[in-house]
Amino acid sequence: HPTPIAIRTHSSDPIPFLLYDSTRQRRRIGFYNEKEAMSEVGDIVQAILLRDVVNRYGVKQPNILERILRFICDNVGNPISVNNIYNTFLSNGDKVGKDTVYSYLSYLESAYLVYRVETMDLKGKGILKSRYKYYLSDIGIKNALMGYRPDDIPGYMENIIFLELRSRGFDVWIGNNN
């Protein structure tokens, strides 16, 4: 007879949440239009980046931190390496060290803005250490920072599927057949 499989429905990871800000005028959610909603999400992301991450870790280049988050937003669903990001900065004339890129990526992960997924070599059955995929904790982050782009729908879908699998307790890996 088949063995039943239990699926965990709750993750032990902390979930980002929004605290009520008593200094702001109270709004009913039903009255947000798309522009206001994206502005609100953008404000939340900026607060997390500037108040939480920059202050907590003493980030010296907040603009680089935000540009790394934008790079991830622009490449959701695509493999990313530190070298990709580093070379992008170099080609733009920015002086950023690889250690800074590594650190800033880890800060974005610790703030639960992004999740890093490792790549599994399906032939050699090993973990590839240099390339990852990064997914956003909420796809609204991408919309707020980059705007909605219909051509990005495959990336949106992959991100949403990743979040759903995590919420159901699955460990997610990216396969590589090469």
Image (cartoon, helix red, strand yellow):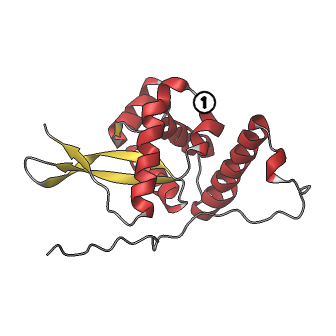
The answer to which quarter of the image holds residue 20 is bottom right
Number of labels in the image equals 1
**Where is residue 41 shown, x and y percent of the image?**
69, 47
Q: Is residue 14 visible?
A: yes
Instruction: Farthest residue to the left: give it.
Output: 124
Viewport quadrant of the N terminus: bottom left
Asked if residue 41 is positioned above or below residue 2 in the image, the reply reads: above
Q: Is residue 163 left or right of residue 6?
A: right
Q: Residue at x 17, y 72 (%)?
A: 2
**Where is residue 48 shown, x and y percent of the image?**
65, 55
Q: Residue at x 7, y 50 (%)?
A: 124
Q: Residue at x 35, y 70 (%)?
A: 7
The answer to which quarter of the image holds residue 176 is top left
**Where is residue 134 shown, x and y percent of the image?**
41, 46
Categorize mark 1 by other alpha carbons within 10 Å: few (<14), some (14-19), many (20+). Answer: few
- What kind of element bears circle 1? loop
Q: Is residue 125 left or right of residue 149?
A: left
Q: Is residue 132 left or right of residue 70?
A: left
In terms of depth relative to the viewer, which is nearer, 80 or 154?
154
In terms of depth relative to the viewer, which is nearer, 157 or 68?
157
Q: Amino acid at mark 1?
A: Tyr
Instruction: Farthest residue to the front: give it.
Output: 1
Q: Is residue 101 visible?
A: no
**Where is residue 34 shown, x and y percent of the image?**
74, 36
Q: Which residue is mark 1?
A: 148
In terms of depth relative to the viewer, which is nearer, 105 or 15?
15
Viewport quadrant of the C terminus: top left
Q: Residue at x 35, y 39 (%)?
A: 80
Q: Is residue 104 left or right of residue 60?
A: left
